[in-house]
Structure formats: structure tokens, C-alpha cells
Image (spheres, coloured by chain):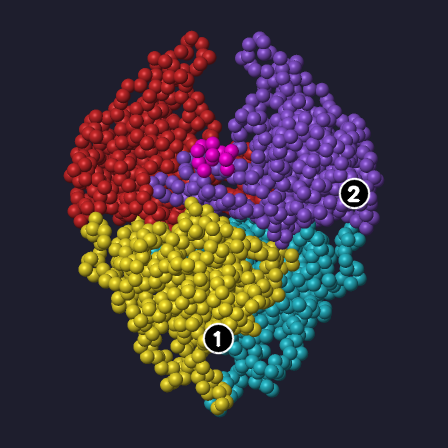
Chain colours: A red, B purple, C yellow, D cyan
Amino acid sequence: MTPALSSGLNTPDSQLESFLIVHPTSIGALALLSLPLLTRVQSENTLSYRGSTVDVSNGQFTVTPTVQSLMMIGMGGNNGSTLCAAILASRHNITWHTKSGMQQPNYIGSVLRASTVRIGAEAGTGKDVHVVGLSMDKAIEHARVLDWDLQRQVAPHMALLGKPLPSIYYPDFIAANQESRADDLIAGTDKQVHLNHLREDIRKFKAENALDRTVVFWTANTEHYSDIIPVVNDTADNLLAAINASHSEISPSSLFAVAAILEGEPFVNGAPQNTFVPGVIELAERHQSFIGGDNLKSGQTKLKSVLAEFLVNAGIKTLSVASYNHLGNNDGHNLSAEPQFKSKEISKSSVIGPKGVLASKGEHPDHIVVIQYVPAVGDSTKRAIDEYYSEIFCGGRSTINTFNECEDSLLATPLILDLTILTELLTRIQYRKLDSSAADTKFTALYPVLSLLSYMLKAPLVKAGTEVVNA
Amino acid sequence: MTPALSSGLNTPDSQLESFLIVHPTSIGALALLSLPLLTRVQSENTLSYRGSTVDVSNGQFTVTPTVQSLMMIGMGGNNGSTLCAAILASRHNITWHTKSGMQQPNYIGSVLRASTVRIGAEAGTGKDVHVVGLSMDKAIEHARVLDWDLQRQVAPHMALLGKPLPSIYYPDFIAANQESRADDLIAGTDKQVHLNHLREDIRKFKAENALDRTVVFWTANTEHYSDIIPVVNDTADNLLAAINASHSEISPSSLFAVAAILEGEPFVNGAPQNTFVPGVIELAERHQSFIGGDNLKSGQTKLKSVLAEFLVNAGIKTLSVASYNHLGNNDGHNLSAEPQFKSKEISKSSVIGPKGVLASKGEHPDHIVVIQYVPAVGDSTKRAIDEYYSEIFCGGRSTINTFNECEDSLLATPLILDLTILTELLTRIQYRKLDSSAADTKFTALYPVLSLLSYMLKAPLVKAGTEVVNA
Amino acid sequence: MTPALSSGLNTPDSQLESFLIVHPTSIGALALLSLPLLTRVQSENTLSYRGSTVDVSNGQFTVTPTVQSLMMIGMGGNNGSTLCAAILASRHNITWHTKSGMQQPNYIGSVLRASTVRIGAEAGTGKDVHVVGLSMDKAIEHARVLDWDLQRQVAPHMALLGKPLPSIYYPDFIAANQESRADDLIAGTDKQVHLNHLREDIRKFKAENALDRTVVFWTANTEHYSDIIPVVNDTADNLLAAINASHSEISPSSLFAVAAILEGEPFVNGAPQNTFVPGVIELAERHQSFIGGDNLKSGQTKLKSVLAEFLVNAGIKTLSVASYNHLGNNDGHNLSAEPQFKSKEISKSSVIGPKGVLASKGEHPDHIVVIQYVPAVGDSTKRAIDEYYSEIFCGGRSTINTFNECEDSLLATPLILDLTILTELLTRIQYRKLDSSAADTKFTALYPVLSLLSYMLKAPLVKAGTEVVNA
Amino acid sequence: MTPALSSGLNTPDSQLESFLIVHPTSIGALALLSLPLLTRVQSENTLSYRGSTVDVSNGQFTVTPTVQSLMMIGMGGNNGSTLCAAILASRHNITWHTKSGMQQPNYIGSVLRASTVRIGAEAGTGKDVHVVGLSMDKAIEHARVLDWDLQRQVAPHMALLGKPLPSIYYPDFIAANQESRADDLIAGTDKQVHLNHLREDIRKFKAENALDRTVVFWTANTEHYSDIIPVVNDTADNLLAAINASHSEISPSSLFAVAAILEGEPFVNGAPQNTFVPGVIELAERHQSFIGGDNLKSGQTKLKSVLAEFLVNAGIKTLSVASYNHLGNNDGHNLSAEPQFKSKEISKSSVIGPKGVLASKGEHPDHIVVIQYVPAVGDSTKRAIDEYYSEIFCGGRSTINTFNECEDSLLATPLILDLTILTELLTRIQYRKLDSSAADTKFTALYPVLSLLSYMLKAPLVKAGTEVVNA
């Protein structure tokens, strides 16, 4: 409570969140929201997602009311705290002043327009467990993403969320400059113990909140790429053994993914690193548990997909693509370290690079990606500058230069919502082939690697042998 | 012949074009090219164009070898002369030096990659008919579009094309600053006489070159919009009567379109004005003759379509779009006059404006379009600057600024090729519905208004009541 | 008073401004500030302003403490209300929250760093005179320039300023779209009566606030250019006679200038129109009263001066300069009308145009200036895009494209301060030539046309026959 | 001779250069030009260079006709070959075709407008000494800088220049990717022998061409920074001893500088590395021989100086400056290696960095410099993108983004001319203080470190303890 501010709040104290939440990681946490129920689509017998078609037969696709949730790893970061604040603002009908007038909460940037999303109403405890670490009201202030008048009003609600539960931190995987932020950790260095702890957190979270389903979402720091090492992370069994032996090449995000898979809950990787080493993928297949990733394709990368496709479709030959980015939030700080940058670079390059839309047309332009940390621009004014230099008719040249200024977290946050809703939905879909013979008429769940998420991800994870559709 | 240059030419004089072409308009002409033959599509029974499907049944869609051609109105302009030169360079295997090395002719920017396009081999006369006017070798020099070493080598071939035949010029429709260019005209002011003359030109051209089909293509100046006047151009009959009465509101481009329709030849309007007044459209329907338009969507406008769609698909709310263009070629000069600019502005606005992709999603951002004439930048360095200012999550803002520098004519020219090939192809397609009942099984030609051309046109003409697909 | 907000204010109500101000124009007003005293410059015997030297001899340049003030015409507009708010925030040590943390008031952008500027302490009345019109606390809200948390805190102080006194409004001179804003006017249409009223306002303002000097500053709307008409505004006497006859070509800004001159107070024109017709200049010379103008050179125009000079100094030949601007504040709205735009265009062009730095070097590049009104971008995100296309060594080309996004009023406001301080200072300076013969040793005041202000003005007014220094 | 082309040449073969030149370095050579004579400045007794004043008294500053020359180290590179070709084109009145028409040779970009510069007429031999290496006509083709029609015509003249004399190459100092270019070297690894060889080259060159003065100019590759090592390069004596001992930390450019100093000829370093280690500077002082550097400030860096100064002068607080560059010439290739980039980065940073104009005002914005090698853009379309993010009045923000496209070598080449002319001129100037007492009236030569060159250099070398003026 912040009494001095109470007279300025739109929401009476008595209506402030009486409970809530939640969970983990010093730079990691859980948020709870119950998703809108899907109403049966009667007329069409078909659910259509962006150019794909999923066939659903009557009787088979039965939707019973369930309660789902989202566990965000990285809840205390900019994206996590922004999403929490926006959901709370929406729930409590908080409006706020900007220099231009009054602003309503909204879900612009979310394709699924999750207008009825609401924070779950059942009690969670956890909050008094933690002593150290940044509480959620402080996290939103630290993030510097939302207008101050919104921060001011949402702060008491955020304070009730407490602070994220302890997480795990293996210094090798994250830039050294992040160490000071990792102040709220699960004790010890035994990775099997850590895995058990994370699984217990998921189970407890579901039980306390009476949830049928929880999507576990990595929105924490970018890690460096894991080496794929035979006998360590190349198969499911090797991976589990390596965790048991606390092998150094098991990353925190892989550990979270394994915890979710073993608990049968979907896991989405919103960061660029290769969380899904072969052993993780095999484990997901074995348990028929869903995984999706990698890397939120929020802004410039999505734009690059679109422009690359435009040039190819116009019959123009792209000679070079130069991408320069600078940003001032903690993501930029972490990426300014070499190995973490490599993860991001590989991920971003995939639009233009070996697996991208240009390569699929046989074009291999010069391509550079630069990411720089410039504290002064903060989170609010990330800059992305891309130049496309192309050959046109009879030796002519065309230059397209795009200059993109945006609030990074405000583009990314709605995608977390969309991916969560979409992931949860995909876990419930069963399908069979329309023209298949009698023998095949059983309905099957989707393949565990959710490639349908690819429009919102930079480096879409797909079933081995399947082509990427990057736009 | 230019003896002084002969030692520098790659092509022996003896192999220079022995004939060719040609036709009309002081700012208008004809080029002849025989199109590549279509091979029957066996396996699929389906011809697919960019997301649409046209059904073709065996036996009905019979392709017999034919010879087609293109008549360009505006052949002496930048686009017309560039296209002629490029085709000639390709036919004669002319390569040329640039500061960066040797350059081959190519068709980059043409989606259909018309690599086998060749100039027709039969004789055209016409060339000695004209005394005044710019010959085609001078036109290409005047255009300043192609590298000089290509200009140098292609000039003797271009000279053999002679100069475009006389055209018609009604001062009201084109900027006053263009008057000095209109130096080669069909005599008189009787519009019926003019119509008869144009029809005769088309018939003669086909006969002399033994053509089955000729596409008539307006690549001449932008005219101002015609007023739609009851009893003048609102119906086919009124239109024909108005021509007979030499009514002042009948534009040159409408007259060319009527000539083509009455001769049963397809007509494409590559400029932005409303050539296709209601009377012209009704006439095309009556004669089952094909028309397509308006306005080549070569560069920035195509990019705007793509970016507008990207923003809509990303769930982002566009607040304003500001488009600034400047260019130094004659198109810019003509457009610097107010009424001609209006034609262009209305056409360009349609991407964002009332019928565009944003409007179709219920978005109506502020939108400005500015076109300026800056002689210094020439044809080679047209600049187009677009800014998209959008609202994102929770009151955030995003700015995307694109700066596009390109050689205007080198982007437009391949589109003329593509539209010609596509138009000719569409005139031969017949279709029937796959699941239609027995009564409907007859094959029908496509509807005369060729909306399938829309990807390459800025203000696609569609059948009344049909939605535009502008991307 | 706004009791609901009082708990959030940093300043106790008892310390709120007990008086203040003020004056005129429905879109016009007065602010009072006492300037910092000038300390005598002992060591150097010379006062140096940006590359010029003014000689001051000991004993002759005696500064006695005085009280000066600023009367802003257009006080209720964005610049006027922003300046008032900033001064009040500074005086009352108001700090405010932004999303990024706490913000202190400052004078960034003011070269003279007027850190000790303070609002005068003596009482002004006037405020209860007005019934209609926007009070200053509403003006700052309407302007949408300052952060909301600053608006919130400064509002009670602003409210005490009351609202600007009535002004004059002649519809011919301002865009029709401004009429609804002109709601607080001096009655009648007799221009002599208006002049007398304005002079009385100045006298009363000085007397009530015990001022020695007041700078009258036009920061109101841009008017269209006045025609220079023989016998009307070509000489001082003709001008006074024309005012007496209420001639239609006497603009409001000229009337304000005449009022200031006749009262012996300096007048600065911060807008682009030709307030200073020949008759006004002659009148200023006759009365030895100071005038300065035209047009605040706040952002892009100053940048253009600098870049044009850079190119000239680098020996590079500029071929074209294209300037595109769009903005969403009332200035943009007014300028979207043709005649007002002409004033702005002529003024802006002067940097590159006939009297600019390029012309002075014999260069006359193609030059276009476009200003567009785009409400969506508001005041906060004015965009200015300039392109410089140049010829370099041996036929090479260079393109420099600048994209400038800024808060228009936040750049302009400090210039009003600087110009006021500088103008007041210049009125007190006397000089004589150092090496002059005995006969010349008297000290003289500066010439009434203050060309030393030129660095901060777009279209510097200079003594006839003097070269402009535009950078 | 290229007989096949002779019919296309404007210059008869008989008038082709009968001799010329020349000298050294596999990527290094000499060009000869006699400078325009200085006429005595009578009226003013003062010679003024860009804001500085040099006092010259009658009788003392006597100019006798002399012949000067330029020896370029790196003559076979883009800048060197371009300068040679431009001088030859100017001398032989060669005009050439571009797509836009005829082009005259010119010296645009040279502030001194060296319109009378001409290639010396006396014979040089050397040319048949070399077997390997790129002849100058091939060098200009390889550079891809000049229009092809100019390349074509100037080639026979360039061929007569032969190829540059052998140079020295120490692999440690230049990027590994340059090794294949270093194909024409002075034998051995003994640095004392190399030094003697270079001195002999200078002496022979002056004798053969009867020169009074030759400016030695480093326009070769960027080397990495030399470590400053006590007892090695910290004093003149240590440096000479280290050369004698062939110490590994003596760079090629330092060796050339020492050769020039010992021969009493001025040396200019046009590249960014620290050629002028303390020992070199002391040696220059000891021999009163002139040195100037570092790094040609041709394009973007000069622009940065200007914009940084503009922001400071406008009272605006710069928060960050981000500079992105990509280019496709050999300079970019060499710089893509880490240590060479460091040299460039340090040099470029000096504008904004510790010694730059912002630092001198107490501002220390975030600053990043990125240089990337993108072969596709070639030499002709180097891109430089700079963003200035600033704080303005009361917490406002301003963003200026500049996008600069230019032909790198065409901006740099005129600066070589200017620096040569200016350097030669400065070697002849003597001065004394105007108001000095009688004891001081002797005229003195300028201090050996030519800080007056700073406007054209990125990291101006100045006398220890003197402030840099970087704009």
C-alpha cells in the first residue's frame, strides 16, 4: 500500500487484488490468467488460422470449460512486468493520463485481441516466501516501459503479486553483466535437484489455482547457444542422465523446458537461444508434450520477413541486407556480450539467411546483423535500421532504407499473450484427414512441435524435414 | 547508322534490325514482340496465379501457336524507349561496360521472367512516314535511364525503329508544360476521325505483322481525371455519341481504349487517370473485349501495400501515413501540374485510402501524398519517403520510416512486359466451376475487367461489387 | 484550485502564485519575467556574440539595475503556455514523474541558459476582466506538450495567471480554420482604436508591474504575407494614415509592432510573415525603437543552415534540397491553408534560397519545401525530412538524408527566452569605434533592426544593404 | 596501348603522356604534380586560412618559383588511382559520357579548387624495373570508382604511368585478408635496409624530376595501432635504434614517415593508425621537418563534427550518438579485421569522444561506431547512418537520423590534393608576433606538427598541450 497516492487512484483499495500468484526465478516468475473459453464453431465445422485449416468433426472436438494459466519465466523483466500490469489495468478498468489526454488499457498488437483475458480469481500464496528480490511494483518502475500515471495506479495491484519465486542461474549461459540481477536463486548447483524443484513449482501452482493447464513461457534473458554434444544432449535419455550428473552444458531454459515436458505442460521459448536441443525435442515427442519457439518476432524481424518476401515477389534481386539495431534495456545489455549476441544474430539471420525466404528462392545476399547496447535510448526508443540494396532491370539499383523506432516491450508483450492463447488452443485440437480411408479415422493430437506458431517467432522450430514458412 | 561508333559495337552492322514496327502518338507508339508460346499444363489441370486458381479442363483450353504483340502508347517516353532498348539488347546479346564491370541485359523485376521475349521478325513500315518528332535512338538518349555504354550500342538498333507514329493531343488533359513535347500529331480536332484513325492503325499493324493479337498499352502521360457526366460518358452509347460530337470531356486515353475495344484487342492503362469511365467499361462488356488498369504499381506503392498489410496483420493500429516523393523525369514534370497530380494522388491513396487494405479493416489513418518535381535527381534517382506512425500496446507508439531510392523507369518497364504477357494469356483462358451442376458446364471467357492484374496495378479496376485485393 | 489533486502537489497552496500578469489577445497574452542583471564585463572591454564584436568602453556602459518583462502575443498557444509553465515549474521547484523516473525543470535548448529567470513578483490584475476564452491551465492541457505529471502540478499555478487579455483578429490574415479559436477579441473594426487599445495595454502593464522595459513578442499564428502597397504601408507616415483609415492590408502583427514602437518597447516577430513592412521599419528607425525578426529558427531550419554551410565549405556542389515536414499542432493546421503556408515557405526557403548561404556562394540548387498537417502526430512528434543531393568529384553523387523527429514547442520555447534576453540586452548596449578619430568618440545605440538575432531566426531582418549571415 | 579503343579516344596517341613518374609500394606509389605558384599577398599583410591567421611581413615572405610534388604511398589503391586518373583527365581535357550526358573533369570537393594542378613534365624512369604488380590502368579498372567511359579514355595515359615501385609489407600490421594484394615488395626483412631504400627512392625521385619539394602522403591501407613501448618508439633515438634492430613494432607507415623526415620532406598520414608514435614526433621536431595527420576526414566524420557542434551551439544535450557504416571497397575489407577496425574506431570516435567537440563542452553521450564490410555495395555506394538522440527543453527528446550515401573515393581524393597543396604551402610560411617586443622579431617557421590541417583530418595531430579544434 502507498497511502500518499491513494487519493489519486481510480480503484478503491478494497477492490485491490486480494491474492495472486505466483512463481519463479529471480529473473523469472509466473503469472496466472484464465483464458476465455472457446465457443464451439458451429456453422463451418472448421477452425481457420492464418492460411492453414484444421478440420474438427462434431462430437470429437468437445470443449469443456477448463481453467488455464501462464507461467512466465522472466516475470520480473520488462516484458513480464509489462504484461502483468496491462492485464491488471484492463481488469480493474484503470485509465491514465498522458500529455495527450486519457488513455485506456488495450491489447493492440495482439492479433487474437484477447479482450476478455482476466487474472484468475483463486488464491495463490507464495508471496511471503520471498525476502530478497524486486517486487512486481518495483519491477514495473524499473522497466520504464509504461506511462508513469499508469505505473502509479497499477503499483498497488502489482505489489500484491509479491515478487517472483527463486529461479536458477548458471553464470556460463548469461552475460556477466547480468550477475548483479540474479539475486533470488534456488540454492545449490545440483541440476537434478533444480529440475525437481521446478516440477514441484509447476504442480503446486496448478493445484493451488485449480488449473487444468498452464503454459510455461521463457521470457527471461537470452542465453548463449548450447553446444550439441553426443552423449550429453543429443537424445532424451542422454539429456536426463546429463541433468542427473549436473553437466555444465545443460542450460537453465532447457531445464525449465524439461520440467514442463515431464509435467505434461506446453513450453514456449520466447528467446533466441537453442533451448530445444535434440534431447529436449525427443523428450517432448516421447511425452506428447507441446513445445514451441524460438524467439518472439515482435518488430523489425517481422518487418524483414515481409520486405524480403516483397522483394522476391517483385522479381527483384536483393544484393545485400544490412541490419543495425540499438536499444537500451536489459536485453540490449545482455546481448552486448558476445555469446548471447551470437544467439540473437543466428536467430535474426534466419529470415534472410540459410533457411529464410530469400534462400528458399535461391538468393544469398550479403547480410549483416548488428545489435548494440545504448543505455540512453532506454526501452522506449529501440531503433532498428535496415537497408535493402537490390539489382533491378538492366543493371539498375534500388535502395530501401527502413528506420523503425518503437517501444520494444510494448511490441513483444502482446505476442506473449497471443502465443499463450494459441498454444493452449493447439493443445486441445485433434484432427483427422478428410479424405482418408476408414482405417485412419481416429483423431490425433497435433505434432508436439508447434510450427503453427511460426508467424510470431523469428526462428520457428519445425518438425525435422519440414520447410519453414517464415512469413 | 553511326559510322564513328561502329568500331565499338558488339553487333555487326549487317545484323542490325532490318525492319521493325511501329506506331503511334507523338508521345505514343507501338512496339512489336511475339510472346513465348504457352505450353499446355498437363499434370495439374490448373493454372495458378499468385493465390488465385483458374480451372482449365482438357480439350477446352487448347493453345494453338499464335503471334501476339504490344502496342505502346507513349513509346517515345522513358518507359517505352527503355523497354524497346532492353528487348533489343537482349535479342542482340549486347553487353555493356559500367564502372563496375560488364553488364548483361536481363529482365529483373519481371515476375514472369520473360526470358524468351523477342521482337517480331516481320516488316513494319511507317517509319518513313514521319518527319518531325524524336526518333527512338534519340528518345533513349533523352530518357537518361540506361547506362551510356548500352545507349551507345543499342542506338543503331533503336534508330531502325524510326519514330513513333502521330498521336492525339488534347491540351486540357495534360499539363501545359508538356505542350512542347506534343510535336507529332494526327491532324484536326474531330474525335470521330481520330477514333477511326487509331482503329485503322491497329488493323494495319496487325495485318502488316501477321498478328493474332495485340495488347494496346497506355504508358503515355498522366491525364487529369475525366468528369463523369450523364449523357456523355456514363453509358456505352452515350460515349460513342459524345465521341462523334467531339465532346470536350473525352480524353485521349479513353479514345485509345475505345479503339482497342472496337477492334477486339485488350487495352491496359498503365497511368493513373480514370480512362475507364462507365461508358468505356460498358462498351468492353458489350464487346467482350478485355481491359485492365489502372496505374503501374512499380515501386513505392507496392511497398505501401505490403507494409499496410503487415501492420494490419500484426494487430497494430496505424494512425497516419505520410508519403513524400520527388523525381526529375517528365512524369514528375507533368504531375507537378495540379489536375494531373490529383489523378496520381487519388490512385496512390487507394492503397491506404477508402478502398485500401487499411480501410477494409476499419482503419482510417491520416494520410497525405506529396509528389514533387525536382529536375536535379533525374529519372535515375527517384526518392520516395513514407512514414507510418502507429499506436501499439497500451498507448505506445511506433514509427517506421522508409526511404526508397530507385530508378523509376527500370522498375516500371518490366511490369509493362508482365502485364502484357499476363493480359494476353488471360484473353485465352476459359473456365467453368468444378462443382457446378450439369447445366453450367460450358466454358466461359474471363470477365472483361481483368482484376487478376491487380498485384501490378495501383488502383485495380474490378467488376462492380467486387472487393479489391490490393496486395 | 483543484482540491482533488492537492494531495499530489509538491507546492503548498499557500505558496501558489498570488498574482500575475497579464495581457492580450485571444490567442495572445503577456508574461512577466524579470531578467538577470548584467554584470559589467571588466577584463575584456568587449562583449562578443557569436562571431561579432561590440565595443564597450569603461564608464560609458553603465548598467543600472532595472526590471524588464516579456509580453507574448500568442501566450495561450503552445509556445506561450509551455514557456509560462516551464518558468513556473522552475520557480516553484516542481519536479515530475515520467516513465523513466523523476524530471527536473530545465532550460535545455536555451543558449543563454537563463537559469535565474524568474516570474515577477508584483501584482497584475486583469484576470477577472475576461469571461470567455481558455484560461492558462486549460491552455497547457490543450497544448499537449508537457508531460502530464508536470501539467497536473503546474495547473494551479497556471490557473492563477487567468487567461490572456482580448486580442485583435482580422480574418483575412489567418487561415479560416482558426476562426473558432478567436473567441476573445477587442471589440470593433476600427484599427486606430485597436492601436490605441494595445498601446494602453502596454503602458498599463508596465505601470502595474513597475517595469523599465518590456519586450513585446509575436508568438501567435502565422499570418499571410502583406502586400507592399504604395501609399499604404511603404512609409511610416503612410502606414499611420492607413491604420487611421482601417485599411484592410494592415495585419494584426504590424499593428502590435506599431504599438510597441510608439511606446518605445522592442518588438520581436517569431512568426514568418512580413510584419515589418517598409513603413514599420521606417517608424522604428524614426523612434529609435528596436525590432527583430522574423521566425524562430528552432529546429530543422537551423539544421539546414548548418548542413548547407557544411556542403559549401566542403567544396561540394549541391544540386537539390527537398524538405518535407509534417506536424499535428495548431501551427500545422493554420499552415495547411495556402497563404499562410506561403509565408512559411518563403521564410524557410531563405536558408537555401535567394538570400541563403548557398546563393551567397553562387549555388542555386533545386529547392522544394513541403509542410503538411497530420493531426495524428500531434505537437510532440513533428517530423522533418530533408534530402541534400550533391555532385562530388568527377561526376560522383552524394545523398544526405536527414530525418528529424522532435517536440516542436520544446525546441521553440527556449528560443523565445533567448531572444527576449538578448533583445533586452541589445537595447542597453552603446558602442563607438575603437580606432576612430576624436570626432567620432560618442557612444551610439545599436541600429534599431537587430540583425544580431539572426542565428535564432529563419529570415533575419537586416539593415538595407547589409549581407545576411544565416548561420 | 589499346588499339581497339583508339577510335573512341578524344586524345591522339601522339599526345599521350610521354613519361611520368614514379614510385613505390605494392599498394603504394608516387605521383608528380607541380603546384600553382603562390602570388604574394600585398594588401593585407596577412594570409588567412579558415579561421586562423598567419602573419607574414613584407620582404621576409619571399616566394621564389619552385617545383613541388606528391609521393603517394598507396597509389595503386582506390584513392591513389582515382586521383591520378582525374589529374590526367583534367590535363588532357578528356570528357566522357554518362547516362545523363557529357561530363567534364573537375575538382569538386577540393576546397582549394586546384584548377591549375598539372602532372609534371620531366621524365621518370623506374617503370621497367617492375615485373609483377598491377599497372595503373588496371588499378583504375579494379577500383570501380570512375565512370567506365572515363576509365576507357584515361587508360592509355594511366598505362604510361607504369606500376607503383615495390613497397614494404609487414603482415602483422595489416589484415590477413590483404596478403594477396601485397605482391610487389622490397626484398628482405631488415628494416634499416628498407629505410635506406625508401630514402633513396625519395632522393632519386626528386633528382630525376628536378623537384624542390615533395610531399609524401600515406594513402595506403589502415594498419593496426602500434603499441607505445619504452625504449622502442618513445623517443627519436630509441626509434632509430629499433629500426636498426628491425624491431617488430615498427610499422610500415612509421618507416615511411621516418624516411621523409630524414630527407626533410613533409609527410601526411591519411589513414587512421598512430603512425606518429612519440619517437616519430620527436624526430620531426629535431629535424624541423613537417608532419600532419591523421586520417582523411572525408565524409561522415566531417558531417559528425558539424552536427555535434550544431547541437552544442543550440544548447541541446546529446544523449547518444550511434554511427553505422558499411562499404564494399578494400578499405572496408581491411577494416573488417579487428585490430584495423580499432584504429578506425578510435579515430572516428575522437569527434564525439574524449577529445571531441562534445567532450570539450562537458558532454559525454553514449557513443557507438560500427564499420561493416558489405561487398555488394562496392566503392560507389558507401552508406553511413548516424543517429543523434538528444534531450531538449523540460524532458523532451529529439532524434536526428542522417543517412548518407556517397562514393567514398570521390570524397577522399580531393582532400589528398588539398592537404598536399596546403602542406607544401605551410612549409614555406614564416611568422612572427605582431605585438612582440623587439627581441622576438625574427621570423620562425611553423611548428612541425601541422595542426592547421585539422579541418580535413579526423584525428588531428597537435602539439602536446594544445587543444584540438575538430570543426
- Give the number of callouts: 2
| Amino acid beneath label 2 | Ala
- For disc 2, the neighbor class at 10 Å (few under 14, some 14 to 19, many from 20) is some
Few, some or many C-alpha atoms within 10 Å of disc 1 (few <14, some 14-19, many ≥20)? some
Q: Amino acid at mark 1?
A: Glu
In the image, residue D156 lies at what x, y percent? 73, 57
Whether residue D291 is in magenta: the answer is no
Q: With C317 as the anchor, is C139 left or right in this view?
A: left
* Host chain of mark 2: B
The disc placed on residue A264 is: none
Alpha-carbon span between mark 2 and mark 1: 69 Å
**Is residue B360 highlighted in magenta?**
yes
Residue visible at 27% across and 31% down in the picture: A118
At horizontal 61% and vertical 83% (from top left) the residue drawn is D42
Disc 1 designates what residue? Answer: C285
Highlighted range, magenta: B353-364
User: Residue B159 bears which disc, if any?
Assistant: 2
Question: As displayed, is residue B455 above or below residue C47?
Answer: above
Residue C111 visible, this angle: no
Indicate whether A360 appears above or below D28.
Answer: above
Residue D146 left/right relative to C225:
right
Nearer the observer, disc 2 or disc 1? 1
Q: Position of residue D33 (x, y in %)?
A: 66, 68
Identify which residue is drawn at 42% across, 25% down.
A49
Q: Is residue A428 visible?
A: yes
